Image (cartoon, rainbow, N blue to C red):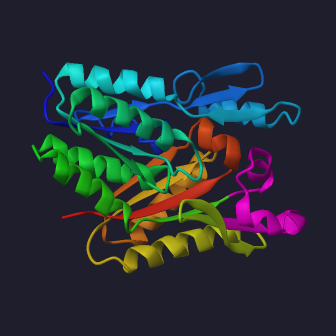
Protein backbone atom coordinates (compact mmCIF):
# COMPACT_ATOMS: atom_id res chain seq x y z
CA UNK A 1 0.00 0.00 0.00
CA UNK A 2 1.38 3.46 -0.88
CA UNK A 3 2.60 5.69 1.93
CA UNK A 4 4.69 8.82 2.48
CA UNK A 5 4.68 11.56 -0.14
CA UNK A 6 3.55 11.47 -3.76
CA UNK A 7 4.55 14.07 -6.36
CA UNK A 8 1.80 15.23 -8.70
CA UNK A 9 2.58 17.04 -11.94
CA UNK A 10 0.82 17.70 -15.22
CA UNK A 11 1.20 16.37 -18.74
CA UNK A 12 3.35 19.29 -19.90
CA UNK A 13 6.31 17.83 -17.99
CA UNK A 14 6.61 15.41 -20.93
CA UNK A 15 8.49 12.78 -18.98
CA UNK A 16 10.09 10.23 -21.34
CA UNK A 17 8.34 6.84 -21.35
CA UNK A 18 9.44 4.59 -18.50
CA UNK A 19 11.52 7.20 -16.66
CA UNK A 20 9.03 7.50 -13.79
CA UNK A 21 8.47 3.77 -13.40
CA UNK A 22 8.47 2.75 -9.75
CA UNK A 23 8.46 6.34 -8.52
CA UNK A 24 5.61 8.02 -6.60
CA UNK A 25 4.59 10.31 -9.48
CA UNK A 26 1.06 11.01 -10.63
CA UNK A 27 0.35 12.98 -13.83
CA UNK A 28 -2.84 14.91 -14.45
CA UNK A 29 -3.42 15.78 -18.12
CA UNK A 30 -4.30 19.12 -19.63
CA UNK A 31 -7.04 19.25 -22.25
CA UNK A 32 -6.66 19.86 -25.97
CA UNK A 33 -9.21 20.89 -28.61
CA UNK A 34 -8.17 20.28 -32.23
CA UNK A 35 -11.02 21.39 -34.45
CA UNK A 36 -13.80 18.89 -33.76
CA UNK A 37 -11.49 16.57 -31.81
CA UNK A 38 -10.88 17.02 -28.11
CA UNK A 39 -9.34 15.00 -25.35
CA UNK A 40 -6.56 14.70 -22.80
CA UNK A 41 -2.97 15.54 -23.64
CA UNK A 42 -0.95 12.38 -24.22
CA UNK A 43 -3.94 10.10 -23.72
CA UNK A 44 -6.58 10.96 -26.32
CA UNK A 45 -4.51 13.44 -28.35
CA UNK A 46 -0.99 12.55 -29.51
CA UNK A 47 1.87 14.66 -30.92
CA UNK A 48 1.06 13.23 -34.38
CA UNK A 49 -2.53 14.42 -34.00
CA UNK A 50 -1.50 17.98 -33.25
CA UNK A 51 1.04 18.08 -36.09
CA UNK A 52 -1.61 16.94 -38.57
CA UNK A 53 -4.14 19.51 -37.33
CA UNK A 54 -1.66 22.39 -37.29
CA UNK A 55 -1.05 21.94 -41.02
CA UNK A 56 -4.71 22.87 -41.60
CA UNK A 57 -4.85 26.64 -41.11
CA UNK A 58 -8.65 26.56 -41.07
CA UNK A 59 -8.70 24.64 -37.79
CA UNK A 60 -8.46 26.25 -34.37
CA UNK A 61 -6.18 24.53 -31.87
CA UNK A 62 -6.74 25.42 -28.22
CA UNK A 63 -5.78 24.04 -24.84
CA UNK A 64 -7.29 24.25 -21.36
CA UNK A 65 -6.36 23.45 -17.79
CA UNK A 66 -7.75 20.68 -15.60
CA UNK A 67 -10.50 22.02 -13.36
CA UNK A 68 -10.12 22.47 -9.58
CA UNK A 69 -12.71 19.71 -9.16
CA UNK A 70 -10.52 17.31 -11.16
CA UNK A 71 -7.58 18.13 -8.92
CA UNK A 72 -9.68 17.63 -5.78
CA UNK A 73 -10.79 14.24 -7.08
CA UNK A 74 -7.21 13.20 -7.88
CA UNK A 75 -5.81 14.45 -4.56
CA UNK A 76 -8.51 12.65 -2.58
CA UNK A 77 -7.91 9.42 -4.50
CA UNK A 78 -4.18 9.55 -3.74
CA UNK A 79 -4.78 10.23 -0.05
CA UNK A 80 -7.28 7.38 0.10
CA UNK A 81 -4.65 5.08 -1.44
CA UNK A 82 -2.49 5.72 1.63
CA UNK A 83 -0.25 8.63 0.74
CA UNK A 84 0.07 11.06 3.63
CA UNK A 85 1.28 14.13 1.73
CA UNK A 86 1.17 15.50 -1.81
CA UNK A 87 3.65 17.87 -3.46
CA UNK A 88 2.02 19.17 -6.64
CA UNK A 89 4.39 20.84 -9.15
CA UNK A 90 3.01 22.44 -12.31
CA UNK A 91 3.55 24.40 -15.52
CA UNK A 92 4.23 28.12 -15.16
CA UNK A 93 1.19 30.11 -14.08
CA UNK A 94 2.12 32.63 -16.80
CA UNK A 95 1.39 29.98 -19.45
CA UNK A 96 -1.57 28.10 -17.98
CA UNK A 97 -4.18 28.23 -15.24
CA UNK A 98 -3.18 24.72 -14.11
CA UNK A 99 -1.28 25.92 -11.05
CA UNK A 100 -4.23 28.05 -9.93
CA UNK A 101 -6.62 25.11 -10.28
CA UNK A 102 -4.24 22.97 -8.20
CA UNK A 103 -3.93 25.72 -5.60
CA UNK A 104 -7.70 26.00 -5.20
CA UNK A 105 -7.99 22.24 -4.88
CA UNK A 106 -5.22 22.17 -2.26
CA UNK A 107 -7.07 24.75 -0.16
CA UNK A 108 -10.14 22.54 -0.15
CA UNK A 109 -8.26 19.31 0.60
CA UNK A 110 -6.21 20.91 3.37
CA UNK A 111 -9.39 22.32 4.90
CA UNK A 112 -11.05 18.90 4.78
CA UNK A 113 -8.01 17.27 6.41
CA UNK A 114 -7.51 19.99 9.01
CA UNK A 115 -3.81 19.98 8.11
CA UNK A 116 -1.50 20.84 5.24
CA UNK A 117 -1.49 17.60 3.29
CA UNK A 118 -1.13 19.21 -0.17
CA UNK A 119 1.52 21.78 -1.15
CA UNK A 120 1.51 23.32 -4.63
CA UNK A 121 4.51 24.71 -6.54
CA UNK A 122 4.40 27.11 -9.49
CA UNK A 123 7.42 25.87 -11.42
CA UNK A 124 7.59 28.97 -13.67
CA UNK A 125 8.75 26.60 -16.42
CA UNK A 126 7.46 23.64 -18.40
CA UNK A 127 8.62 20.50 -20.25
CA UNK A 128 11.58 18.74 -18.63
CA UNK A 129 12.58 21.95 -16.85
CA UNK A 130 9.50 20.93 -14.86
CA UNK A 131 9.96 17.19 -15.30
CA UNK A 132 13.48 16.92 -13.88
CA UNK A 133 12.58 18.65 -10.58
CA UNK A 134 9.56 16.35 -10.37
CA UNK A 135 11.86 13.35 -10.80
CA UNK A 136 14.36 14.69 -8.26
CA UNK A 137 11.58 15.19 -5.69
CA UNK A 138 9.99 11.81 -6.39
CA UNK A 139 13.33 10.03 -6.05
CA UNK A 140 13.72 11.64 -2.62
CA UNK A 141 10.20 10.53 -1.72
CA UNK A 142 10.92 6.97 -2.88
CA UNK A 143 14.00 6.95 -0.65
CA UNK A 144 11.80 7.73 2.36
CA UNK A 145 12.31 11.49 2.66
CA UNK A 146 9.67 13.48 4.53
CA UNK A 147 7.29 15.83 2.76
CA UNK A 148 9.32 18.94 3.65
CA UNK A 149 12.45 17.48 2.09
CA UNK A 150 10.53 16.39 -1.01
CA UNK A 151 9.05 19.87 -1.39
CA UNK A 152 12.45 21.53 -0.85
CA UNK A 153 14.06 19.23 -3.43
CA UNK A 154 11.54 20.30 -6.06
CA UNK A 155 11.88 23.99 -5.27
CA UNK A 156 15.69 23.91 -5.12
CA UNK A 157 15.95 22.01 -8.39
CA UNK A 158 13.76 24.61 -10.08
CA UNK A 159 15.95 27.52 -9.00
CA UNK A 160 18.75 27.01 -11.50
CA UNK A 161 17.18 25.53 -14.61
CA UNK A 162 18.15 26.66 -18.10
CA UNK A 163 15.87 26.24 -21.08
CA UNK A 164 16.33 27.20 -24.71
CA UNK A 165 14.11 26.39 -27.65
CA UNK A 166 14.18 26.83 -31.39
CA UNK A 167 11.08 27.09 -33.56
CA UNK A 168 10.88 26.97 -37.35
CA UNK A 169 8.32 29.76 -37.28
CA UNK A 170 6.72 32.15 -34.79
CA UNK A 171 3.33 31.63 -36.40
CA UNK A 172 2.08 29.01 -33.94
CA UNK A 173 3.07 31.08 -30.91
CA UNK A 174 1.22 33.99 -32.49
CA UNK A 175 -1.89 31.87 -33.13
CA UNK A 176 -1.92 30.61 -29.57
CA UNK A 177 -1.43 34.02 -28.00
CA UNK A 178 1.83 32.98 -26.30
CA UNK A 179 4.22 35.05 -28.37
CA UNK A 180 4.77 37.82 -25.80
CA UNK A 181 7.83 39.99 -26.41
CA UNK A 182 8.79 37.97 -29.50
CA UNK A 183 5.94 39.75 -31.31
CA UNK A 184 8.49 42.38 -32.33
CA UNK A 185 10.13 39.75 -34.55
CA UNK A 186 6.97 38.93 -36.52
CA UNK A 187 7.69 41.47 -39.22
CA UNK A 188 10.89 39.63 -40.10
CA UNK A 189 9.69 36.14 -39.17
CA UNK A 190 10.38 34.75 -42.65
CA UNK A 191 13.97 35.99 -42.51
CA UNK A 192 14.93 34.69 -39.06
CA UNK A 193 15.07 31.46 -37.13
CA UNK A 194 14.38 32.34 -33.49
CA UNK A 195 15.73 30.97 -30.24
CA UNK A 196 13.54 31.71 -27.24
CA UNK A 197 13.54 30.84 -23.56
CA UNK A 198 11.38 30.96 -20.49
CA UNK A 199 12.25 33.67 -17.99
CA UNK A 200 10.12 34.65 -15.01
CA UNK A 201 7.59 32.14 -16.28
CA UNK A 202 7.10 33.79 -19.66
CA UNK A 203 8.29 33.08 -23.19
CA UNK A 204 10.89 35.66 -24.19
CA UNK A 205 13.02 36.10 -27.33
CA UNK A 206 16.69 35.35 -26.86
CA UNK A 207 18.45 35.37 -30.24
CA UNK A 208 17.58 35.29 -33.92
CA UNK A 209 19.66 33.66 -36.62
CA UNK A 210 19.43 33.47 -40.38
CA UNK A 211 19.24 29.71 -40.92
CA UNK A 212 17.98 26.65 -39.10
CA UNK A 213 21.49 25.16 -39.13
CA UNK A 214 22.96 28.19 -37.38
CA UNK A 215 20.08 28.35 -34.92
CA UNK A 216 20.43 24.72 -33.89
CA UNK A 217 24.22 25.11 -33.55
CA UNK A 218 23.61 28.11 -31.29
CA UNK A 219 21.02 26.15 -29.32
CA UNK A 220 23.68 23.51 -28.64
CA UNK A 221 26.25 26.14 -27.66
CA UNK A 222 23.87 27.75 -25.19
CA UNK A 223 23.23 24.39 -23.55
CA UNK A 224 26.96 23.65 -23.27
CA UNK A 225 27.53 27.10 -21.72
CA UNK A 226 24.70 26.57 -19.23
CA UNK A 227 26.08 23.20 -18.16
CA UNK A 228 29.61 24.59 -17.77
CA UNK A 229 28.29 27.30 -15.44
CA UNK A 230 26.92 24.71 -13.01
CA UNK A 231 29.21 23.30 -10.32
CA UNK A 232 28.72 19.55 -10.48
CA UNK A 233 26.74 17.11 -12.58
CA UNK A 234 23.76 18.17 -14.67
CA UNK A 235 20.62 16.62 -16.09
CA UNK A 236 19.91 17.33 -19.74
CA UNK A 237 16.79 16.88 -21.86
CA UNK A 238 16.27 17.35 -25.58
CA UNK A 239 12.69 17.96 -26.71
CA UNK A 240 11.28 18.00 -30.21
CA UNK A 241 8.05 17.96 -32.17
CA UNK A 242 8.04 15.81 -35.30
CA UNK A 243 11.84 16.10 -35.54
CA UNK A 244 13.23 12.86 -34.05
CA UNK A 245 16.36 12.74 -36.23
CA UNK A 246 17.31 16.31 -35.31
CA UNK A 247 16.73 15.52 -31.65
CA UNK A 248 18.82 12.34 -31.64
CA UNK A 249 21.65 14.08 -33.45
CA UNK A 250 21.59 16.92 -30.95
CA UNK A 251 21.50 14.45 -28.03
CA UNK A 252 24.60 12.66 -29.35
CA UNK A 253 26.48 15.94 -29.79
CA UNK A 254 25.55 17.12 -26.30
CA UNK A 255 26.69 13.80 -24.82
CA UNK A 256 30.15 14.50 -26.25
CA UNK A 257 30.31 18.15 -25.27
CA UNK A 258 28.81 18.03 -21.77
CA UNK A 259 30.94 15.57 -19.77
CA UNK A 260 29.12 16.56 -16.56
CA UNK A 261 25.79 15.24 -17.88
CA UNK A 262 24.80 12.34 -15.64
CA UNK A 263 21.58 11.88 -17.57
CA UNK A 264 20.51 12.92 -21.09
CA UNK A 265 17.00 12.10 -22.24
CA UNK A 266 15.01 12.74 -25.42
CA UNK A 267 11.28 13.39 -25.32
CA UNK A 268 8.74 14.54 -27.87
CA UNK A 269 6.46 17.27 -26.59
CA UNK A 270 2.76 16.54 -26.70
CA UNK A 271 -0.30 18.35 -27.93
CA UNK A 272 -0.45 21.18 -25.38
CA UNK A 273 3.02 22.59 -26.03
CA UNK A 274 3.08 21.34 -29.59
CA UNK A 275 0.04 23.44 -30.45
CA UNK A 276 2.04 26.57 -29.57
CA UNK A 277 5.50 25.77 -30.95
CA UNK A 278 4.73 23.83 -34.13
CA UNK A 279 6.53 21.03 -35.99
CA UNK A 280 10.31 21.20 -36.11
CA UNK A 281 10.71 22.63 -32.62
CA UNK A 282 13.85 21.69 -30.70
CA UNK A 283 14.51 22.48 -27.05
CA UNK A 284 17.30 21.81 -24.59
CA UNK A 285 16.84 21.78 -20.81
CA UNK A 286 19.76 21.86 -18.35
CA UNK A 287 19.16 21.28 -14.65
CA UNK A 288 21.63 20.73 -11.76
CA UNK A 289 21.74 17.15 -10.52
CA UNK A 290 21.19 17.61 -6.79
CA UNK A 291 23.58 15.71 -4.58
Please tell me whether the stretch drawn in magenta is mainly helix, strand or loop.
helix
95 horizontally vs 126: left or right = right
Query: Residue 173: image x %, image y %?
Result: 74, 51
Confirm whether the magenta stretch covers residue 220.
no
Please identify the quarter of the rendering in which residue 115 is found.
Answer: top left
- Vertical position of residue 225 compared to residue 44: above or below: below
Query: Residue 75: image x %, image y %?
Result: 33, 27
Q: How many marks?
A: 0
Give the residue at the far left of this rendering: 144
Quadrant of the snapshot with the C terminus = bottom left
- Vertical position of residue 106 compared to residue 34: above or below: below
Query: Residue 155: image x %, image y %?
Result: 32, 58
Name the residue at 74% across, 31% down. Answer: 52
Name the residue at 22% across, 19% down. Answer: 80
Q: Nearer the viewer, residue 98 or 14?
A: 98
Confirm whether the magenta stretch covers residue 172.
yes
Quadrant of the snapshot with the N terminus = top left
Can residue 262 be seen here? no
Please identify the quarter of the rendering in which residue 210 is found.
Answer: bottom right
Query: Residue 232: image x %, image y %?
Result: 26, 74
- Vertical position of residue 37 compared to residue 120: above or below: above
Start-end of magenta stretch:
167-195
21 horizontally vs 40: left or right = left
88 horizontally vs 165: left or right = left
Amino acid sequence: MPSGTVVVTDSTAYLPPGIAEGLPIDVIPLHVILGDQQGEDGIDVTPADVVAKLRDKSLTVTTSRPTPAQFVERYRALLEQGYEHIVSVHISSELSGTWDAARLAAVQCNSDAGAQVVRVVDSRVTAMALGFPVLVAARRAAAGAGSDEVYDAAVTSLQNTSNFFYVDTLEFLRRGGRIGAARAWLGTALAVKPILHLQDGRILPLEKLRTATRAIARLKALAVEAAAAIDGDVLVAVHHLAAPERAERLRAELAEEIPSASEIVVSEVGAVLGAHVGPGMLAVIVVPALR
